[in-house]
Image (spheres, rainbow, N blue to C red):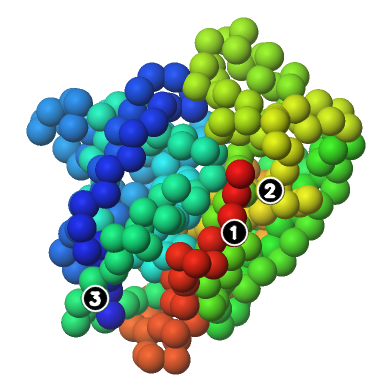
Amino acid sequence: MQTTIRSTIRFDGVGLHSGAPSRAVIHPAAPGSGIVFRRVDLGPDAGDIPARWDLVDRSPLCTRLVNGRGADVATVEHIMAALVGCGVHNVLVEVTGPEIPIMDGSASVFVRAILAAGLRGSAAPVRALKVLRPIEVRRGDALARLSPHDTLVIGFSIDFEDAAIGRQRKLLNMSNGTFVRELSTSRTFCRRADVDAMLANGLARGGNPGENAVVFDGDRVLSPGGLRHADEPVRHKMLDALGDLGLAGLPILGHYEGRRAGHALTNDLLRALFADPAAYRIVECDADMAARLPGVGVHADEIPEVA
Ligand SMILES: [Zn+2]
């Protein structure tokens, strides 16, 4: 059955790139409506912004959606991961500015609130996208691939010259509440040199090391309190991938593999998938299939404690 949240949830924070105050409010929505964003500051003529792969502007720093009237919302990937990872199918997300608030840089604030509000089911069946044959995209030495699997599996590998990040790889099956336990608290991260460059360009004004991003400099972690997991960066990349795959508009049954991939490449992958009708099938989930989707078996008491 399709789900929505039981009650409205409000998040007050700042945009990571603009530093401007931003409020996001998640409202329950009817079956079949999907996840939809709305810029309340732009007025009714701006129209809604559905969380859909074909509305993604592939800017490298975050996932930004733009509708046909030019209304946009950026940094949607973490709230998307929280919704998808908690098994929420239909909500309206109102936002007061061009960016979803970054909160602590992970999905945990959103996840806690969603699970505290609780989910409401409907009689409407859940549909899923079953991957039928491998699809792969590359940009330079980065790769993203989807191949057939009967659950959603996410594998990721990264390789940074900063010794404190280095090479990390991880593979997780997203069934049985894995997202909440293993990924939801892992924060976005950046390198000191990148922060300096972004500040010089007027970006990342909301980026406050220790509050909403982990900052690495060579072999050092600059953020007070250190890491939440020894491999927090690769876990965050998996969180991003889950959120970006959520822009397919329905749960994916398949094995995603990312190597040094980012938001734009995962979007390239969805575009390649939807361009090839023989590569996937939309299926109505039976009970067995539905029981293996992300969001089934998630519990608030399994969110790791964080400082
Ligand atoms: Zn992220």
Of residue 59 and residue 17, the one placed in the foreground of this image is 17
Task: Determine the secondary structure under disc 2.
Answer: loop
Q: Is mark 3 within 8 Å of ligand 1?
A: no
Badge 1 amino acid: Pro
> Residue 266: horizontal and vertical position, in percent?
57, 50
Return the mark for residue 228: 2
Residue corresponding to mark 1: 304
> Residue 56: horizontal and vertical position, in percent?
42, 41
Badge 3 amino acid: Gly
Badge 2 amino acid: Arg
Q: Quadrant of the C terminus?
A: top right
In the rendered view, tell whether residue 223 sits above or below residue 94: above
Q: CA distance from mark 1 to mark 3?
A: 26 Å
Q: CA distance from mark 1 to mark 2?
A: 9 Å
- The answer to whether marks 3 and 2 mark residues whose Cβ atoms lie closer than 8 Å is no
Return the mark for residue 121: 3
Q: Residue at x 44, y 91 (%)?
A: 288
Q: Residue furthest top?
A: 200
> Residue 111: horizontal and vertical position, in percent?
43, 56
Q: Residue at x 63, y 26 (%)?
A: 209
